[in-house]
């Protein structure tokens, strides 16, 4: 699945379509959405124009097309969009089921020369159109008849125009199904407290809950023209593989992090996240000194480093948090060389949580001495500063484009500024591959060694969205 699919293309179309073809003579476009129950809604001219541009672009890029009989256009469907454009003809977009998924949709173009069927021709133009269709409220029954070419389905009485909320539709287009929560990464990594480099994998996903019911509830609670609420379940995972440097090239589980959070969208890049409950653990099982010593002996008996046993020490916490992200659009003038984004994240680790139970933290038998080293002394407050470069930073066409430059500062919520961590990231697209150079110094290199000061660096790929 194309990683830049929703994150780049839906946003470009939904924000910039009004500027496209600004000097062209406007065409009269009629757009009506109907469903299987013959309800319908007439769209405003702005939304009609947007959908027309998206579907014309889809048709223009599609090579998988076939001539069909007019009677082959489906009469059974979840929803259908009718577009009448004097310059193109009649376009119909059929949603076969209640999914914002191009593979469950078909496009038909009817002209004086006949009807053409388009399917499986890419996603970037179709997903925003499907998101708008799926969330449109259909108000008035349409006449009990089928329509194909010529004029769009007429109404026997004036049809109220259904409300359209651009922010919600943009969010549904980009985040309405399975999507990235945080960037997904695959990189080669080296830590200063580890003799061996390894391949590090970060996987981050989110999925919205309650669908249309949640969307309607958001409209009741907030101003739907400015705000949008969505409840998500999310998962962050981190895994490391020691290729050829340890016996059998093991994969070490570093972090399992499911969470349930409510996101209050205020713009495409502006939101507040309320993590209602999160759990973070490493999936390991050593929780006492005897088990740790036995694990060390196991590695010694096979000629391996006994320090490998540390990777099997169990860690786990439940937490709640709040995060605020804001894109600062002012101050760049008309040049708009990029976007400046800030993210403030405050997290509270629970001593005894509903999923984890008692937190599994530093054990006094791990190192000499008995000083307490709780997670909240080293983590809990983060401030991120991120600059996203515009296309002005591309050279050799699109073969080399700067992506983002991000700096994150983290400190402990229990002892602010006592234990600090800095992370620096630079991304770029090179020949279409999204490369990342990454460095970190401070604490929380992984859950086992969260209290150790470590310097790490890596290079690899970063996939921002599905």
Image: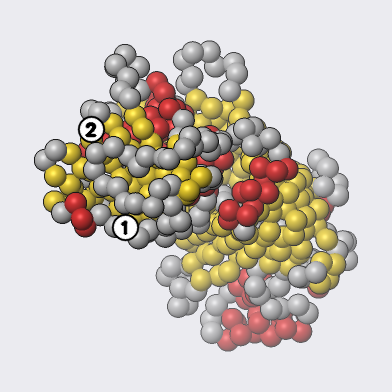
Residue visible at 42% across and 70% down? 244
Q: Looking at the picture, how far across and down is residue 256, in whole percent?
A: 63, 65
The residue at the far left in this view is: 113
Residue at the spot of label 2? 88
Dot in front, 1 or 2: 1
Image coords of residue 213 (percent x, y): 63, 55
Q: Position of residue 72 (x, y in %)?
A: 21, 57
Does the residue at mark 1 contact the one at mark 2 (Cβ under 8 Å)?
A: no
Instruction: Relative to 256, say whether 39 is above or below.
Output: above
- Extreme residue in the front direction: 156
Residue holding disc 1:
75
What label sits on residue 404 in the rendered view?
none
Closer to us: 243 or 415? 415
User: For residue 332, what is the image quadrant?
Assistant: top right
Can you see residue 382?
no
User: Could you tell me how many numbered marks the image carries?
Assistant: 2
Q: Which residue is more in the foreground, 334 or 202?
A: 334
Q: Is residue 299 above or below residue 342?
A: below
User: In the image, 40: left or right of 385?
Assistant: left
Q: Residue at x 43, y 40 (%)?
A: 156
- Taking the image as shown, residue 235 lies to the left or right of residue 400, namely right
Q: CA distance from mark 1 to mark 2?
A: 22 Å
Q: Which comes sooner in the sequence, label 1 or label 2? A: 1
């Amino acid at each position: 699945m194309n990683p830049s699919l929703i994150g780049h293309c839906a946003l470009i179309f939904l924000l910039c379509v009004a500027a496209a073809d600004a000097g062209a003579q406007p065409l009269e476009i009629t757009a009506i959405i109907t469903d299987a129950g013959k309800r319908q809604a007439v769209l405003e001219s702005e939304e009609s124009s947007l959908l027309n541009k998206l579907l014309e672009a889809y048709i223009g890029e599609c090579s998988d097309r076939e001539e069909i009989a007019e009677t082959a256009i489906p009469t059974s469907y979840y929803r259908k969009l009718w577009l009448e454009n004097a310059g193109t003809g009649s376009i119909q977009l059929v949603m076969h089921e209640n999914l914002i998924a191009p593979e469950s949709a078909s496009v038909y173009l009817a002209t004086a020369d006949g009807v053409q069927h388009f399917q499986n021709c890419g996603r970037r133009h179709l997903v925003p159109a499907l998101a708008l269709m799926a969330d449109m409220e259909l108000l008035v029954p349409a006449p009990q008849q089928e329509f194909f070419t010529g004029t769009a389905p007429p109404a026997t009485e004036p049809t109220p125009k259904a409300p359209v909320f651009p922010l919600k539709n943009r969010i549904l287009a980009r985040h309405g199904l399975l999507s990235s929560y945080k960037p997904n990464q695959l990189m080669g990594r080296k830590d200063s407290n580890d003799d061996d480099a390894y391949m590090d994998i970060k996987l981050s996903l989110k999925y919205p809950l309650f669908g249309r019911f949640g969307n309607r509830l958001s409209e009741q609670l907030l101003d739907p023209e400015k705000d949008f609420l969505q409840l998500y379940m999310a998962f962050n995972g981190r895994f490391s593989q020691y290729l050829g440097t340890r016996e059998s090239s093991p994969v070490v589980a570093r972090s399992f992090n499911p969470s349930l959070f409510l996101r209050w969208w205020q713009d495409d890049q502006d939101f507040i996240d309320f993590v209602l409950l999160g759990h973070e653990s490493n999936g390991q099982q050593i929780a006492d000194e005897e088990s740790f010593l036995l694990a060390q002996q196991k590695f010694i008996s096979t000629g391996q480093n006994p320090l490998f046993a540390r990777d099997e020490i169990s860690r786990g916490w439940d937490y709640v948090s709040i995060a605020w992200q804001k894109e600062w659009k002012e101050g760049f003038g008309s040049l708009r060389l990029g976007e400046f984004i800030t993210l403030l994240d405050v997290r509270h680790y629970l001593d005894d949580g509903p999923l984890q139970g008692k937190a599994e933290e530093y054990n006094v038998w791990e190192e000499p001495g008995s000083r307490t080293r709780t997670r909240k002394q080293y983590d809990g407050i983060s401030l991120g500063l991120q600059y996203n470069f515009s296309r002005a930073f591309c050279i050799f066409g699109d073969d080399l484009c700067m992506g983002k430059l991000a700096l994150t500062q983290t400190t402990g919520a229990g002892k602010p500024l006592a234990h600090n961590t800095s992370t620096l990231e630079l991304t770029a697209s090179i020949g279409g591959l999204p490369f990342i150079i990454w460095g970190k110094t401070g604490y929380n290199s992984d859950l086992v060694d969260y209290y150790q000061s470590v310097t790490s660096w890596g290079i690899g790929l970063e996939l921002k969205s599905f």
